[in-house]
Image (spheres, rainbow, N blue to C red):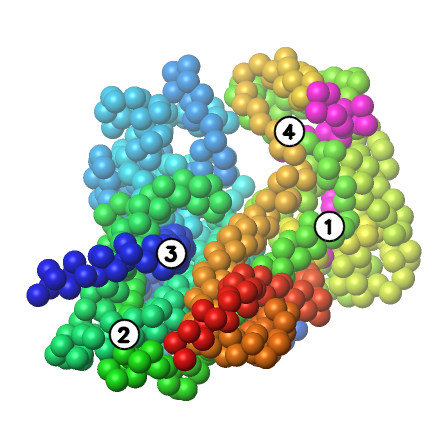
C-alpha cells in the first residue's frame, strides 16, 4: 500500500513540474537559510562552553560615580583573586591572566611574531577546563619561566620535534630562557581570551619587565581574574556578598562577577581581551532564521491549498470507489513528506556548497562536521514538527471535499479556509516589510557611522609598529628612532611624522585609565574615571585635530614636558565653563603638576559605539607607534605603494634586526564596527531570500484566487468588463492585504530597530521614509507577483471559462 502511495505521489510531482519546482525551491531556500544562520548562531553561543563552565565567573570592577556604582573595567587587581578566595569558601579556585600584548618569540635564528600571550596561574587549566596535548597540567605552569605553547605555534617553531624541555627567548627580555612545559590544542576551542602561549604567573615576580609592578596591590587593575565556585553554591547570594565586601585599601570601587559563558556576546567593557560579539545581532539573526523557515512553510501551505481545487475531482473519484479519509490523508501526507525530504537533501547540499561564501560574509570558519550536525539536531526536530504541521492543513482540506460537489466541479474551500490562506499571506508580508525596514535601517546606521565626523582625519595616516630585537640600551634606541623619523621626513611622499602611545581606533589597552585629579580651581575628584596617553608635539597636526582653545605642545629640544592637552569632555569634567580660561592653568595628578597647553574639540577615540570620554594627552616621546601622514602626492595607488616600500626599507635600514608592521588608520577605525557591517550584509541577504519565498507564496495564492473566480471573470467579460477592470478586481484585495501587513509590521519593526540601535552611542533616527519605502517596495513586489497570473486569467476566452455551465 505504501509503495503504491509513494508511486502515486512521485507521478503527481513529476506531472505538476511547476508546482513541484516552486514548492521544493521554496522549502530548499528556507531550510538552507535556516541551517546557515543557525550554524553561525551556534558558533557565537559556543564561546567559553566547556565542562564546568557554568561554575566559572569573571571578576570585574564597579566604579562609584555620582553616588552609584556603574560597571567598570573588565580587569581586576592582582590581589583580587586570592583575597576573594580567602574571604568566601564558596570559591574553589581562582585563575589570573595578565596580557603580554603581541609578543615575539626567538629560537635559534628564527623570529616568530604576531603572538598573543598571557601570564597565567597554574590553576588555569582546571578553571578553563583545558587539557594538554603534551605535558602535565598539574605542573606545567608551576615554575618561573615555564611556557605552554599552542600546538600550532609549537609546530611552527619546532616542526614535528618534541618541544618539551626546549627553550625559547622572548624579544626584549635579554638572555632569559623560557622552558617549554606543554602544548595545548586551540583548534575548535572558542574563547574570549585567546592565547598562542602562556607563561607561568610566578615569572611575574622576577621578570624585570614587570619590576615597577611588583609592589602593586590595590592600585593597578590589569589582571583578568576568574573564579570557579562550588557546585552547590548560591551564585546570586555569592555575587551580592562579593559586591558588599570592600577590602581594605580599595576605595570607590567594588568587585562584581559575571558568567564566563556570557562574556563574548554580552560584555563590552573597557579593556576587554578582544572585541566581543554582539548578542543583539545574534538574536536578530536567529529571529530571521525562524522567520525564513516559517515563510517557506506558509508558502508550502498556500501553494498546496491553491492546488487543492484542481484535485477535487480526483478526491471525489477516490471517495466514490471506497477510499476513506485516513487513506486519502496518508497519501497526501506522503506527498508532503517526499517534497520535504527532497528539499532537506537539497538544502544540506546547498549548505555544503554555499558555506565558503557564507564564511567569507561572516568572517568565520564554520564547518558542517559531525559536531555541528549534532548541534543542529534540536532544530531538525523543530523542522520536522513544522513540516508535519504545514503538510497537515492541505491534506485536511483535500479530504474534506464532498464527492457529489467535487465530481460536478463545484468544490470550494470554506470561508474559514479562505480566511486562513489570506492570513498566511498577510503574515508573510508582515515579515517581509519588517525585514525590509530592518535592512534599510541597518544600512542607514552603518552609513551614518562611516560618515559621521570623528574629530580627526585618519585617511592619509599610517601607523608603523615593530619590535627591535637587538636593542642595546634606551639611549641608543632613542638615537636610532630620531634617525628613523628624520629619514622619513626626507621622503617626498610624507608630510609629517610623530610618535604616539595610541591613536583613534587603536586597542583600548593602550589607554591609561585614572581616578584622582586636582582641577585648576583646587577641587579634587577621586570618584570619576578619565583617560590619558602620551604623544609627540606633531601628533595633532598629523591627526588633523581641531583646537577650540590654546594649541599643541610647544616644540622644545626636550623629548617630554609637563604640558598636556585636554579635550572638551575633560574640560567639562573639570567644571570649566569657558575653555579659554583653562589654557595655561595647572592640574595635578600622579603627584605632579601639569600645564594645560590647549583644549581639543571632542573626538571619538574608541569608535561610535562608545561616547566621548574625558581625555588628557601628555607630551612625552613615545615610540610605541610611528604615525606617518602622507601628502597629496602619495594619495594615488601607485605612489601609496611606493611610500609603503620606502618606509619598509628605511625601517630595516635603521633597525635591521626587528619586526615591522603597518596599519592604515582609517581602515582600522572602520573595523571597529565590522560586526555591524557583517550583520547588515547578512540581514540584506536573508531579507532578499525571505522576499523570494513570500513572493512564491503570493504566486500560489494568486493561482488559487484566479481558479476560484474563473467563471466570475468569464461572466464579467461577457457583460463588457475590460482587462484593466478585471486586473483591478483581482489585485485590489492584495493591495488591502499588503496595507494591513504594513500597519502590523511598522510597530514591530520600530520596536526591534529601536532596541538594536540602543547599543550605539551615536545613532541615526528612525526616519519615516524608511517605513514608507519598505511599504511601497512590498506593494510593488506584491503587484508584480500577482499581475502575471491576473493578466493571464483576465485574457482567458470567456467561452472556455463558462463551458461547463
Disc ID at residue 464: 4
Q: Quadrant of residue 162?
A: top left
Q: Secondary structure at mark 1?
A: helix
User: Mark 4 Cα within 10 Å, few/some/many (few <14, many 20+)?
Assistant: many
Q: Quadrant of residue 742?
A: bottom right
Determine the residue positioned at 69% across, 18% down. Answer: 642
Query: Alpha-carbon distance for marks 1 and 2?
Result: 63 Å
Which is more toward the observer, 473 or 357?
357
Q: Quadrant of residue 693?
A: bottom left
Upstream in the sequence, badge 4 or badge 3? 3
Residue where numbered disc 1 is placed: 451
Quick check: marks 2 and 3 in contact, CB under 8 Å? no
Q: Secondary structure at mark 4?
A: strand
Q: Nearer the viewer, mark 4 or mark 1?
A: 1
Q: Is residue 443 left or right of residue 425?
A: right
**Residue located farthest toward the bottom when viewing the structure as drawn:** 415
Q: Nearer the viewer, mark 3 or mark 1?
A: 3
Q: Is residue 453 above or below residue 148?
A: below
User: Mark 1 Cα within 10 Å, few/some/many (few <14, many 20+)?
Assistant: few
Upstream in the sequence, badge 2 or badge 4? 2
Query: Alpha-carbon distance for marks 4 and 1?
Result: 25 Å
Disc ID at residue 313: 2
Q: Is residue 758 above or below residue 187?
A: below
Disc ID at residue 18: 3
Quick check: marks 4 and 3 in contact, CB under 8 Å? no
Amino acid at each position: 500500500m505504501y509503495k503504491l502511495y509513494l508511486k502515486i505521489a512521485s507521478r503527481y510531482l513529476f506531472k505538476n513540474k511547476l508546482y513541484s519546482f516552486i514548492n521544493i525551491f521554496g522549502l530548499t531556500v528556507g531550510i538552507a537559510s535556516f541551517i546557515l544562520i543557525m550554524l553561525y548562531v551556534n558558533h557565537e553561543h559556543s564561546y567559553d562552553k566547556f565542562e564546568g563552565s557554568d561554575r566559572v565567573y569573571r571578576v570585574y570592577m564597579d566604579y562609584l560615580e555620582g553616588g552609584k556604582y556603574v560597571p567598570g573595567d573588565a580587569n581586576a587587581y592582582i590581589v583580587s583573586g586570592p583575597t576573594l578566595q580567602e574571604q568566601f569558601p564558596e570559591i574553589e579556585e581562582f585563575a589570573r591572566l595578565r596580557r603580554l600584548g603581541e609578543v615575539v618569540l626567538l629560537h635559534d635564528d628564527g623570529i616568530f611574531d604576531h603572538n598573543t600571550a598571557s601570564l597565567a596561574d597554574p590553576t588555569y587549566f582546571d578553571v578553563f577546563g583545558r587539557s594538554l596535548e603534551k605535558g602535565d597540567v598539574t605542573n606545567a605552569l608551576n615554575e618561573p619561566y615555564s611556557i605552554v605553547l599552542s600546538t600550532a605555534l609549537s609546530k611552527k617553531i619546532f616542526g614535528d620535534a618534541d618541544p618539551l624541555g626546549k627553550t625559547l627567548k622572548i624579544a626584549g627580555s635579554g638572555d632569559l630562557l623560557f622552558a617549554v612545559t606543554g602544548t595545548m590544542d586551540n583548534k575548535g576551542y572558542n574563547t574570549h581570551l585567546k592565547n598562542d602561549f602562556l607563561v607561568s604567573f610566578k615569572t611575574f615576580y622576577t621578570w624585570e619587565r614587570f619590576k615597577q609592578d611588583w609592589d602593586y596591590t590595590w592600585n593597578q587593575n590589569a589582571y583578568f581574574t576568574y573564579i570557579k565556585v562550588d557546585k552547590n553554591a548560591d551564585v546570586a547570594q555569592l555575587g551580592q556578598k562579593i559586591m558588599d565586601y570592600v577590602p581594605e585599601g580599595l576605595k570607590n570601587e567594588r568587585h562584581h562577577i559575571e558568567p564566563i559563558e556570557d562574556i563574548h556576546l554580552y560584555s563590552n567593557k573597557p579593556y576587554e581581551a578582544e572585541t566581543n560579539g554582539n548578542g543583539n545581532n545574534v538574536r536578530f539573526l536567529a529571529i530571521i532564521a525562524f522567520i525564513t523557515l516559517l515563510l517557506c512553510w506558509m508558502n508550502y501551505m498556500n501553494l498546496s491549498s491553491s492546488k487543492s481545487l484542481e484535485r477535487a475531482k480526483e478526491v471525489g473519484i477516490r471517495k466514490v470507489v471506497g477510499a476513506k479519509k485516513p487513506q486519502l490523508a496518508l497519501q497526501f501526507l506522503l506527498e508532503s513528506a517526499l517534497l520535504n525530504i527532497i528539499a532537506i537533501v537539497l538544502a544540506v547540499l546547498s549548505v555544503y556548497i554555499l558555506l565558503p561564501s557564507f564564511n567569507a560574509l561572516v568572517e568565520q570558519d564554520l564547518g558542517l562536521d559531525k559536531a555541528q550536525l549534532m548541534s543542529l539536531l534540536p532544530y531538525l526536530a523543530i523542522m520536522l514538527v513544522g513540516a508535519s504541521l504545514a503538510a497537515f492543513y492541505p491534506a485536511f482540506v483535500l479530504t474534506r471535499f464532498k464527492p457529489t460537489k467535487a465530481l460536478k466541479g463545484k468544490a470550494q474551500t470554506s470561508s474559514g479556509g479562505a480566511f486562513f490562506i489570506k492570513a498566511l499571506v498577510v503574515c508573510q508580508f508582515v515579515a517581509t516589510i519588517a525585514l525590509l525596514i530592518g535592512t534599510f535601517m541597518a544600512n542607514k546606521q552603518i552609513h551614518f557611522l562611516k560618515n559621521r565626523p570623528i574629530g580627526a582625519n585618519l585617511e592619509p595616516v599610517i601607523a608603523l609598529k615593530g619590535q627591535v630585537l637587538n636593542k642595546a640600551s634606551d639611549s641608543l634606541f632613542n638615537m636610532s628612532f630620531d634617525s628613523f623619523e628624520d629619514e622619513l621626513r626626507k621622503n617626498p611622499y610624507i608630510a609629517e611624522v610623530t610618535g604616539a602611545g595610541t591613536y583613534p581606533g587603536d586597542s583600548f589597552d593602550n589607554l591609561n585609565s585614572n581616578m584622582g585629579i586636582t582641577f585648576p580651581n583646587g577641587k579634587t575628584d577621586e570618584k570619576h574615571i578619565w583617560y590619558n596617553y602620551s604623544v609627540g608635539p606633531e601628533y595633532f597636526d598629523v591627526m588633523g585635530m581641531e583646537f577650540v582653545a590654546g594649541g599643541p605642545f610647544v616644540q622644545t629640544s626636550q623629548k617630554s614636558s609637563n604640558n598636556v592637552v585636554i579635550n572638551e569632555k575633560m574640560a567639562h569634567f573639570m567644571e570649566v565653563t569657558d575653555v579659554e580660561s583653562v589654557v595655561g592653568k595647572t592640574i595635578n595628578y600622579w603627584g605632579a603638576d601639569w600645564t594645560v597647553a590647549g583644549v581639543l574639540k571632542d573626538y571619538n577615540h574608541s569608535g561610535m559605539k562608545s561616547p566621548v570620554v574625558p581625555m588628557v594627552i601628555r607630551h612625552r616621546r613615545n615610540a610605541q607607534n610611528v604615525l606617518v601622514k602622507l601628502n597629496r602626492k602619495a594619495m594615488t595607488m601607485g605612489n601609496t605603494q611606493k611610500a609603503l616600500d620606502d618606509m619598509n626599507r628605511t625601517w630595516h635600514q635603521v633597525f635591521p634586526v626587528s619586526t615591522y608592521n603597518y596599519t592604515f588608520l582609517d581602515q582600522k577605525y572602520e573595523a571597529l564596527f565590522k560586526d555591524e557591517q557583517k550583520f547588515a550584509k547578512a540581514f540584506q541577504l536573508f531579507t532578499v531570500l525571505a522576499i523570494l519565498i513570500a513572493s512564491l507564496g503570493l504566486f500560489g495564492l494568486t493561482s488559487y484566487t484566479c481558479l476560484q473566480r474563473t467563471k466570475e471573470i468569464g461572466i464579467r467579460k461577457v457583460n463588457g468588463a475590460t482587462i484593466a477592470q478585471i486586473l483591478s478586481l483581482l489585485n485590489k484585495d492584495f493591495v488591502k492585504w499588503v496595507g494591513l501587513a504594513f500597519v502590523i509590521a511598522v510597530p514591530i519593526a520600530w520596536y526591534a530597530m529601536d532596541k538594536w540601535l540602543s547599543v550605539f552611542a551615536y545613532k541615526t533616527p528612525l526616519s519615516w521614509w524608511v517605513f514608507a519605502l519598505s511599504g511601497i517596495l512590498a506593494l510593488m513586489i506584491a503587484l508584480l507577483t500577482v499581475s502575471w497570473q491576473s493578466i493571464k486569467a483576465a485574457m482567458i476566452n470567456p467561452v472556455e471559462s463558462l463551458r461547463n455551465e
